[in-house]
Image: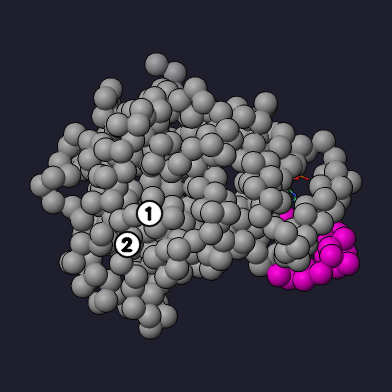
Amino acid sequence: MTVQWSKGLEGIIAAKTSISLVDGENGRLIYRGHDAKKLSLHHTFEEVSYLLWHGTLPNAQKLQSLQDRFKKSRVLPGHLLAIMKQLPARMSLMGVIRTCLSSMEDQSYQWPPTIDQAIAVTAVIPAIITTRFALLNGNKPVDPDSSLNHIENYLYMLHGKTPSDAHVKALTAYSILTMEHGMNASTFTARVIASSESDLVSSVAGAVGAMKGPLHGGAPSEVTSMLNDIGAKEHAEKWITAKLKNNKKLMGFGHRVYKTTDPRSEALKEMALTLSGEDPWLDLACHVEAAALTLLGQFKPGRKLYTNVEFYAAAILKAVEIPPELFTPTFTASRMVGWTANIMEQSNDNRIYRPQSLYTGHIPPL
Ligand code: COA
């Protein structure tokens, strides 16, 4: 067998999957044969979760049953509340999610992974995020409302009021578009852990650890900082030019796989525009995007740099009033669906991951 080395496993196929296709050349993202952009505009979080887990969209009866199971699992277990109260305030919210997930492990999570396990870890994340956020801010956590769907309930637990339809639609689109994205670092982590026949909780806790890194889940809050720094439309060209002259990267542009517009950013932009009304921040975002694309074309000709998902994700999350420190946790709440779908797929045709390393040290004489 020829053994190849590729830094970061770039170009190496690490699994066969029927869950998603990232078609970078044509700017398409496909979930189980469906266009993710269309799904994000016309379906609920629960419906697309069902699609990624089972392979088909649910009929009315299956959807009802899934919604009921989500509602049962969205209440924070008592011991998680007790643990959360003990964790130091300086701990990051991603660290709190990872710790809470780890604490959910019991006999019911043994190998092999199941849909019930996937629902349990997906449905509980909004309660973890909103409870911790409330405690940190000295507020009383809001209990879930069983009349609301998953996304409505997340916004309700965060803000303590029934969200507007426009906000629900926007966060639903964001969540669906970020649920799954091929063999990224956190999904790979989840699959590697699952391949040892470890439990699903360990796999998703490991995936949260990978997602926490700034090279993976952290870009939307950096887009917000960039837009805050630019401050006003008239400063955009000067600010961007200075960055590019110093060979700095612009947050929210460029992608390893997409060499055309990221389909997720197009869908989110459309959604953001319908939401905005006269929103000056969004107006600034649109202006900065246009200026950045023009200047990237001049400073980096031929590099195929386009707007990526993080740029308009920041706009959407800000528009639905999610604070920047909750951007990565909110991304995690949706990506949980993709991770668990991959863990189940891995278990269906498992072989433990065992790549090799290329030894570059001293070899003593025989
Ligand atoms: N702003 C300015 N220049 C950029 C750029 C950006 N956002 N992204 C890439 N480039 C330039 C690089 O400087 C490099 O220029 P060079 O040929 O003169 O050296 C060229 O384009 C290729 O860059 P490279 O880093 O090799 O591309 P990549 O495909 O490996 O990188 C990213 C992909 C996402 C890591 C990169 O585009 C990036 O860092 N973007 C900003 C962060 C971001 O938005 N991340 C979220 C991704 S979803």
In the rendering, which numbered label is found on residue 144?
Answer: 2
Region in magenta: 228-250
Place of residue 278 in the rendered image (x, y in percent of width and height, measured from the top left): 75, 63
Residue 337, picture quadrant? top left
Q: Which residue is mark 1?
A: 148
Dot 1 falls on a residue whose secondary structure is: loop
Residue type pointed to by label 2: Pro
Q: How many marks?
A: 2
Q: Are marks 1 and 2 in contact (CB under 8 Å)?
A: yes
Of tags 1 and 2, the one toward the viewer is: 1
The residue lying toward the viewer, choosing from 201 and 160, is 160
The image quadrant where one finds the N terminus is top left
Dot 2 falls on a residue whose secondary structure is: loop
The residue lying toward the viewer, choosing from 167 and 346, is 167
Number of other residues with Cα within 10 Å of mark 1, as a class: few under 14, some 14 to 19, many 20 or more: some
Place of residue 183 in the rendered image (x, y in percent of width and height, measured from the top left): 47, 35
Residue type pointed to by label 1: Leu
